[in-house]
Amino acid sequence: MSLEHDIDKLRERYDRGTLTAETAGREELAVLEEFLLALEAGEIRAAEPRDGDWAAVEWVKSGILLNFSLRETEARTYGDVTYHDVLPLQDTSDLGARDTRNTPDGTTIRRGAYVGSDAILMSPSFVNIGAHIGDGTLVDSANTVGSCAQIGDNVKLGGNTLIGGVLEPVEDTPVVIEDDVSLGAGTRVTSGFVVGEGSVVGENTLLTPRIPIYDLVEDELRYGELPPDRRAFTRFVESSVGDHDLFEGGAYKPAVVAMDIEADTRDATQREAELRSS
């Protein structure tokens, strides 16, 4: 039997009401443990590319949800701190063997997350269950990588960056940041937005399917995705609200402008990567 089959069977029993956190025994918890280990090894992922688009892997999402539904909250300890959760934190003793660095006092990796080789996680940062962080990626200080978020290789997540998850609130497809992307400090990426390979996003940019992307390269209006090799930044455009008695000059709403990446932008990100690896 495959792991997918075992997760599907647990889900069927849970949906019928014949399996709960109170009745889950050693056999059921062993399946959940095998599932978490497969996530942490990168053997399974919550989303994958299909026919040029990213799609959620439903049975993996189901397995992640079962790890909450079929476990009870317990008192746990981390150093001198007692906390209460359904899952413990991940054992990070193997990070050094794959040349991945994490700094003390606030680098938190939850069970079921994958972190690749030659990565850097600065404190404080939080990586949630189901997240996938590729090789050579930098997760800078004050960052959150949400549940099931897919972060590619050689990505830079600038300080105070938020990558949204799929569990709170529940979304169909996780956020995807493809290879060689650089997100400026304060960037927010939510609700299944996809940032294409090689793009550079300016500071304090909000990327969500509800905000339009004005792609000046293809002369198109897009939602939910930033194409590869774009330089993106926030601008404000006129809102349909228009003039109103409460304020003068009309109303404006945020938008994102996407342009070709200029040579000096690429050079700057390459120099930063060299400094990071030194």
Image (cartoon, rainbow, N blue to C red):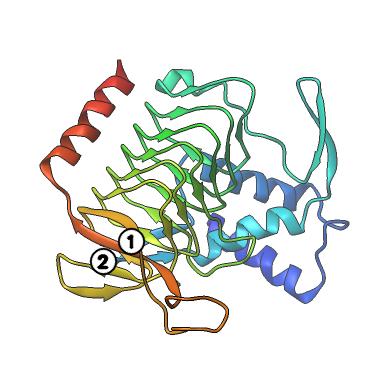
The quadrant in which residue 269 appears is top left
In the rendered structure, which amino acid carries the disc numbered 1? Pro
Is mark 1 in CB contact (under 8 Å) with mark 2?
yes
Q: Is residue 152 left or right of residue 166?
A: left
Q: Secondary structure at mark 2?
A: loop
**x and y percentages locating residue 200 in the rendered image:** 28, 47
Residue in front for this viewpoint, 195 or 48: 195
- Rate crowding at label 2 as few (under 14), some (14 to 19) or many (20 or more) other CA atoms within 10 Å: few
Q: Is residue 51 visible?
A: no
Residue 117 rendering spot, x and y as whole percentages: 39, 29
Give coordinates of residue 176: x percent, y percent. 40, 56
Side of 16 relative to 275 (left or right): right
Circle 1 — which element?
A: strand
Q: Please name the residue shown 47% across and 18% down the image.
A: 96
The picture quadrant where one finds residue 185 is top left
Q: State the residue at coordinates (64%, 22%).
A: 105
Residue to which mark 1 is pinned? 49
Residue 268 rendering spot, x and y as whole percentages:
21, 33
Q: Which residue is under mark 2?
A: 52
Q: Residues within 10 Å of mark 1 (few under 14, many from 20)?
A: few
Q: CA distance from mark 1 to mark 2?
A: 6 Å
The mark total stands at 2
Along the horizontal axis of the image, is 103 left or right of 154? Answer: right
Q: Using the image as rendered, state which of residue 171 and residue 96 is in the foreground.
A: 171
| In the image, residue 91 above or below residue 160 | above
Residue 17 numbered tag = none
Placement of 238 over or under 60, stated as above or below: below
Q: Name the quarter where the C terminus is drawn.
A: top left
Dot 2 amino acid type: Gly
